[in-house]
Amino acid sequence: MARRETATGYALLAPSLIGILAFLLLPIGVVVWLSTQQWDLLFPPQFVGLDNWVSVLTDPTFGRSALISVLFVLLVIPVQTALGLLLATLLSRGLPGSAFLRVIYVIPWMCAPLALGVVWRWIFSPSDGALNAITGVYVEWLSSPVLALPAVAAVSIWSQVGYVTLFFMAGLAAIPATLIDAARVDGASAWQIFWRVKLPLLRPTMFFVLVTGVIASFQAFDQIYALTPGGGPEGTTDVIATRIYDEAFRGSSDLGRASVMALLLFLVLVVITLAQQRYFRSRITYDLS
């Protein structure tokens, strides 16, 4: 009976296990193998050992892309998280039109990032763009080395804030009303209720939002590529994802170096995720009773 139940369990898990093997573990293994090869997609791969790793780690261009990615994440995550929490708090009050606004906020997140990038590139256009036409000021939003990265970050925030808002709304809805009522009976103000009651109980949601947001921001490619192809003015929007693409499919077409960059990005995300998990582990409360 025990063996039969075990076999049944593995049979039920088989579709998911096959998917994990085919679409997660196998691609990672292929990328690890490619990181030791020199391959331009035209000639057979050649084993080069750790030469690709040394080349990438000593490449100032990759270091600059890593720094730009960090700056992009620092521009996006704090604003995106704070704005999503603010909108969730306002929409959770059940004011007239809240249901309609929920749909409006989530539409950008549901749209294709590449298509949104093309639309926003027209909006930011200095000659016939909608933004300059509305403000009446001629600004090179995507051609300026100073403004290009903040402009791209603003588009990313606009497209992801609805996603963040939805999760914070779910977290707020899970907080028992009895805790809020008890705080009001004790004389707590609206700000004290938010800061002392709601925000601590939102830490599981905050952890999830931050982890997924950081991962998505470090991997951002579609919108950045559509808004500022080729790395933007003076390479100011050449994040790691675009650097991997350019290394693999443009220029020298070196899949070995591109694989090393992808693995380094993966390792960085693992370290950041573990650091966030360790930080929130002792600060998360799941018991709402």
Image: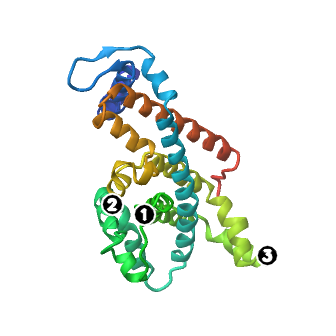
| Side (left or right) of 90 relative to 233 | right
Using the image, tell me which numbered label, if any, was put on residue 117: 2
Tag 1 residue: 155
Query: Nearer the N terminus, badge 1 or badge 2?
Result: 2
| Side (left or right) of 144 relative to 74 | left
The Cα–Cα distance between marks 3 and 2, rounded to whole angstroms, is 50 Å
Camera-side mark, 3 or 2:
2
Tag 3 residue: 186
* Contact between labelled residues 2 and 1, with CB atoms less than 8 Å apart: yes
**On-image quarter of the C terminus:** bottom right
Residue at (65, 54) in percent of width and height? 287
Q: Can you name the residue that lies furthest to the bottom here? A: 96
Amino acid type, label 2: Gly
Camera-side mark, 3 or 1:
1
Element class at badge 2: helix
Residue in front for this viewpoint, 240 or 61: 61
Can you give x and y, in whole percent of width and height, for residue 232 in the image? Answer: 40, 53
